[in-house]
Every structure is written in C-alpha cells, then in structure tokens.
Amino acid sequence: MPSAATPEIVVGIVANPASGRDIRRLTAKASVFPTAEKANMIQRLLGPLGQLGVTRVLMMPDATGISAGVIRAVRTHHAQRLPPWPRLEFVDIPLQDGAEDSVTAARAMAAAGARLIVVLGGDGTHRVVAGAVPGMPLATLSTGTNNVFPDLREATVTGLAAGLFATGRVPPERALRRNKCLHVQVGDRHELALVDVCVTRMAHVGARAVWSGETITELFVAFAEPDAIGLSSIAAMVEPIGRDEPDGAYVRCAGDGRTVWATIAPGLVSCLGVAEAGRMQPGVDYLVATRRGSIALDGEREIELLDGEGAVVRLALDGPWTLDVGATLREAVSRGALGGDAVRPPDP
Amino acid sequence: MSETLNRESLLEAYRTMRTIREFEERVHNDFATGEIPGFVHLYAGEEASATGVCMHLTGDDYIASTHRGHGHCIAKGVDPVGMMAEIWGKATGTCKGKGGSMHIADLEVGMLGANGIVGGGGPLICGTALASKIRGDRTVGVCFFGDGASNQGTIFEAMNLATVWNLPAIFVAENNGYAEATSSTFSVACDNIADRASAFGMPGVIVDGFDFFAVHEAAGEAIRRARDGGGPTLIEMKLSRYYGHFEGDQQTYRAPGEVQKLRETKDCLLQFRKRVTANGEITGEQLDAIDAEVKAMIDGSVVKAKADPKPAAADLMTDVYVSY
C-alpha cells in the first residue's frame, strides 16, 4: 500500500448495467451482454491499474449485480493474496436506474479527483458520460449493441494503458486523442452526439433504438467508416469519413434515391435510398429538413420533433478526449515504462 | 412497422389506461369499507403494459393473466361493468359472481383468466399457442406473469416448450420489483428476467413498462414475429405497482415516498398526456372528456354492482365443472 504521503491516483469506472438489452435483441440478432461479464471486465481492469500504482478506483454503484459481483471478487482477491488491486470505493449517489446515474457518478468521480474514467457501455453510454464531464479523459470499452465510438478490446490491455496514463508514465499529448462530436439544437434543448444524429419518421421515442432503415429520413455523422456497425455505416457507403478527418457528413434518404446496403444493426443489412450526401464543415449549422418525427443520438431516439419546431446539427472538433490504447502502449514501450520494476509484484 | 399511432389509436390507448386506473382506484377505496368479499390485488401503475400489449391483439388471440389481473382483463376487452359485479360477488358478474377478483375469465374475448396460481399462465398459453400453430390461423397467445412467477418451474417449462415447438407465444414478465413483500433483487438470481431468454433460445428485451409507446413498439414487433412463425419472445417490463401486494398490505418493505415519487415522475398516464398534447396530436380537453366518461362508467358500475343480486344458493354447483 502507498504511504500516507503518497498522492492518491484515482481512476473512475462507469459500467452501464442496461447496455446491450434493447429491442434490437428482437428486431435484429444483437447479443445480450451479460452482467457477469461486465463485472469480469472490471476485475480485469483492476489488475493492471493496481500493479501500475493507481491507488483508488471509484465505481458507479448499481442494483443489477455488477457492483455485487465486483465486491465478491475483491474479497476473494484479497483472500488469495494476489497482485494488488487499488482500493475500491463506490461513489455515493442516489440511484435512479437510468442514464442520469452515469451522469451523477461521472461528476462525482471528477469532483473526487479522477484522472480518467473508464466507461463500459455502448455509444449511448459514452455520449452521456462525455456530456457530463467535458474535458475528462475517457477510456472506452464496448459492452453495447452498436459500438462505433468505444473500443472493442480486452479490458486488461485498456487497464494497462489507463494505468500508464493515470500514473503519468505516458503524458496526455501521447496518450489522448481528441474526438469530433455533433451538437443538436431543438428549440431550447441542446444535446450531444459522438457518432451520429439520425432523424426518423417515428413520431415517438418509443423503444428508443432505431432498428428499421425504412424510417430514416436524414443522417448526420461525425465519422463514418465502412467496417462499422450501426447507423453511421449508411453514410460510410456514400461519403466515408475517417475518425481523424476534420469533416463530418450528412445523408438525406429517399425511396427513389441511390440504393445502398448498410449494416445498421447486428445481423441486419438494410437497403436504403440515398437522395443526397455530402460533407459537413465544422462550426456550420445544418438544418434538419424533416418537420416531424424523432431524433436519435448515437442510435437511440431521444427527441420527439414537434411539427415545425426546427432543429439544427453542428459538427465540432472539440469533442471528448479518449485514451488511445495502442498509442499509449507504444509510447510506454519506447520509454521503457513497462520494463524492470515498473509493474508491482504480488505482496509477499 | 408503424411509424406512428393515429389519433384514434392514441385515444383508445388513453381510454384503456384510464379505465384500468379508475377501476383500480375505485376498488381500492371500496375495499377499505369492508363490503367487497375476498382478496384483491390491484394493477394501478402498470397500465401501460397491459394496454400496449393488448392493443396488438384481436378477439381470437388469447392471454393468460395473474392474480393481479384486472388490467389485463380490461385491456383484452372484458366488460368492466361485469368485472365490477364479479368483484362484488354478484350474479351479474363476468363469472356469475363465483370467481371473484382472482378468477375473472371471459373466453369470448380470449381472456383465459386471472389466476391465483403464481406462474400458472405459462402452460395455458403453450396450449393455446399450440392450437394456433396447428390451425395455422396466425393467432397468438400472451402470458403475463410477474417477477415472483419468473422463478417458477412452470414458467421455465413453458418457455422451453414454446421454443421447442416454435409456438406463437409471447411471455410478458411484469417486473414490479416485489414478489409479495420480497424484493426481486433478493429473489431473482439473475439481474434481469429478460436475460433468461437466451437460455430458452428466444430473444429477450427490456422495456420501460411505464412508457406506453415503448411497450407498444416492442410488443408489436414480438407479436408480429410470432404471427409470422418466428416463435416466442420474452419481454421484461420494468415497472411498479402503486398499491400493496394485496389490499391491506402495509408495505413496510417499501421506502418512504417511493410510490409518491413514481406517481409524480413516471406515471404512464401523466407521461402519455404530456407527450400527445405537446405536439397537438390530442388536446387536453379530449383527454379530460375521456376521464369524465370513464369515471361516470365506473361509478355506474359500482352502483349497479351494489344493487345486483347475489348468486342463489341453488347456483352453488352450476358452472363448476365443464363437460367436454
């Protein structure tokens, strides 16, 4: 354990208990992401974080079993005298069983001095956390349905990179990347999206996920890569945009437009008609042409668009900072940060 | 898929949910007077679930209900006037006053019955769904059950059989958080009932059971899939009940203010009203008019139930057994 004079090195973990369970299990072939696996992933994070010297981990509590699974694992871990884990604590927040829990937890972690927050969830979870704590570096791990923003990666490796960054072994300018984002303004309401803003003919938020290509009227993307799953794949078929390019893209759909096939959900390849597509410039307001329907942020309907209310979408280059796991580890190797006695052995 | 619900459908949904709420609030008040015989388990708070599911069903589809069955009955089309008389134990009731709250059944509208046996509905729905499949008439069966029943072997067996036989069955788990007085967090071994679906080879989804629109959309897809031969689905509705397990339950297992907060922040009727009036689909006056009509109908049903005759002693053995 560090001495009393050793400064605390704090890392937060937000694991969304609800990710991976929406209607796309029914309308597509999306998999269920088990709670037990989320708890396992957190354990696989705690190992490298502890061995690299992170002293304290703050977790979001939940009532579905992730926290309970981790608590059980901590007891077992201590009993077996395995390599040290950081001290685990849960932020003291009133649980609402909704996305607001991630917001409250992330803010509490920031207030407690977290240097980075590891997020386990889909695009929607990352959007919520990024909006709650602007400027906070995020380490992303995919446990959702359509995951374009977060990494689909072994948690141990992400934990290693997170530990290297949090302990200062790899500086921010080498470890972090700046992401683009999309700002949506509907009347007085402002929302953020990290990957895509999708306008649909569906009048109601309903089951939230957008799972039918037929209902899509417009799409705005911060980036669109042809090998992605989800709505951004539509734009990728006509106007591919890299994650690090300074542009975005828009697509307007119409039944008589150019036909494209896109993987909009697991197991679901949809045929859509694209009437118009082009690049979005940062800082420019793009008007939503659809007068009535709903707007999905990163795949989930969040806003019911009232008749004639009007909405605009704007691309910004100053989105959230995320941990570039590959770059961080490469830098660590070049600095020798993982050699010799950098990693703590088990306690005697 | 439906992109939107038309005005008539929205009004129908509201009327059904309001009828259930008014019915239950009235039974709650009248039960406290001691005049109503037997036990009642009220559905108030859960209206969006029964309504959002049953709006997709026809009179030829079947549902199996639970001990908390009034909402399912009304949503499936059972006459509330007859139901009220049934609960009051009168000869004019749906089951001639001999079933009471927990055994209201009306096969004419596809309502197999409320059921005092926890988890008893699953096998019944496998039976109707098998009949549907053999007839090939695209009808479906819906089994409503609670978080308590989700732990019963009958439900496991029914879900297994439904997949093995690829039945047009939909399993709707209404997880209101409590099996009688036991929190589901203490009694359900997995974290979400929907997670059990994969073990039975069917899709499982979680839906906000307070949100009519979310229920309607998910149930619509599950029912369409079943009609098309796609097989069974498990839908878990996350919701809560406003009253105790039974009337008279002191609910000492619930946090202070828990129900009041739900009524103020999540109530399905309030959410519905806010959303359909915000965009001008429906006016507040239209909904107010439905409120008044429903209240008058429920008031009238109680007046009638009180005045109606009880079953005669000679009726004791009639309708008890059925000869096939």
Image (cartoon, rainbow, N blue to C red):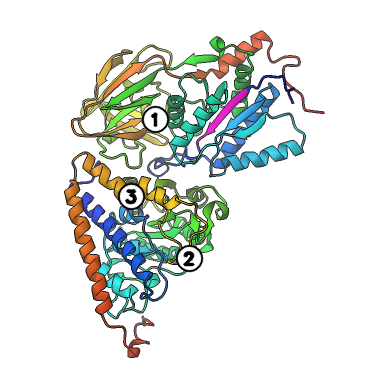
Q: Residue at x 40, y 51 (%)?
A: B260
Instruction: Rate crowding at label 1 as few (under 14), some (14 to 19) or many (20 or more) other CA atoms within 10 Å.
Output: many
> Tag 3 or tag 2, which sits nearer the N-term?
2
Q: Is residue A222 above or below residue B312?
A: above
Q: Main secondary structure of the magenta part?
A: strand
Assign the C terminus of chain A to one quadrant of the image.
Answer: top right
Assign the N terminus of chain A to one quadrant of the image.
Answer: top right
Segment colored magenta: A10-16
- Quadrant hosting residue A8: top right
What separation in Å lies between label 1 and label 3 (alpha carbons)?
Answer: 31 Å
Q: Position of residue B33 (x, y in %)?
A: 36, 72
**Residue designated by label 2:** B118
Instruction: Rate crowding at label 3 as few (under 14), some (14 to 19) or many (20 or more) other CA atoms within 10 Å.
Output: many
Residue B94 visible in the shown view: no
The chain identifier of the residue carrying mark 2 reads B
Q: Is residue B170 above or below residue B92?
A: above
What separation in Å lies between label 1 and label 2 (alpha carbons)?
Answer: 41 Å
Q: Which mark is residue B202?
A: none
Q: Position of residue A97 (x, y in %)?
A: 47, 42
**Residue designated by label 1:** A230
At mark 1, the secondary structure is loop
Q: Are marks 1 and 3 in contact (CB under 8 Å)?
A: no
Residue B169 visible in the shown view: yes
Q: Is residue A184 above or below residue A27?
A: above
* In front of the other: A217 or A300: A300
Indicate which label's residue lies in the foreground, 1 or 2.
2
Q: Amino acid at mark 1?
A: Gly
What separation in Å lies between label 2 and label 3 (alpha carbons)?
Answer: 25 Å
Q: Residue at x 43, y 17 (%)?
A: A243
* In front of the other: B256 or A168: B256
**Residue designated by label 3:** B268
